Amino acid sequence: MIRPVLKYGAPELEATSRPITQCDDEMKALVQDMLETMYAAPGIGLAAPQVGVNLRLIVLDISGGEEQGHQMVLMNPEIMEQEGSQEGEEGCLSIPGFTGVVERPARIVVTSQDLGGNPREMEADGLLARVVCHEVDHLEGILYLDHLSALKRDLIKRKIKKLIRAGDW
């Protein structure tokens, strides 16, 4: 089931997410809904808070569904190591129509759990590292806007307020 994606301004996007303590059929259904929602948007990553669920869960597929085997589910992800730096254009399903250049680590090591509750450790670089960092930020109530210069961030926020007043947000 495709779920509505919350937009900038929703308080759920600013909350710190709770850890997942068990993986049951309800959690597996949430993961399936999140994957369907991400692909329908279309996007390459989605965090549970973006669909109004306060849990430390992200799904991603840097191929955008174009290639098999790129789909990932990370429960309770935590970035353990980071090194280097990369800059790149980022957008967000919760801030449609806007992008900004964000600096992220070039390489990360992230621990998480799979849907069976088994621990995993993954090394990521490039686009995958960028997407994981972006989605983990969502779990902390941080949006990519928070990484932009004050000038760029305020410009986007003013444009969004104008869209809200016009009833287009």
Image: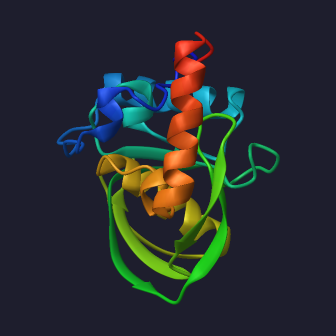
Tell me which corner region of the image, top left, top right, bottom left or bottom right, holds residue 37: top right
**Residue 63 spot, x, y in % from top left:** 75, 53
- Which residue: 34% across, 60% down? 112
Q: Residue furthest right?
A: 66
Tell me which corner region of the image, top left, top right, bottom left or bottom right, holds residue 121: bottom left
Number of callouts: 0
From the viewer's perspective, is residue 125 above or below residue 54? below
Tell me which corner region of the image, top left, top right, bottom left or bottom right, holds residue 119: bottom left
Visible in this render: residue 94? no
**Residue 60 spot, x, y in % from top left:** 57, 49
Q: Residue furthest top?
A: 167
**Residue 46 spot, x, y in % from top left:** 52, 41
- Quarter occupied by the C terminus: top right
**Residue 100 spot, x, y in % from top left:** 63, 57
Q: Residue furthest bottom?
A: 84
Residue in front for this viewpoint, 57 or 94? 94
- Which residue: 37% across, 34% down? 49
Visible in this render: residue 137? yes
Give left or right: position of 39 versus 155: right
Residue in front for this viewpoint, 106 or 78? 106
- Which residue: 39% across, 48% down? 138
From the viewer's perspective, is residue 113 above or below residue 14? below
- Quarter occupied by the N terminus: top right
Residue in front for this viewpoint, 132 or 7? 7
- Which residue: 75% across, 43% down? 65
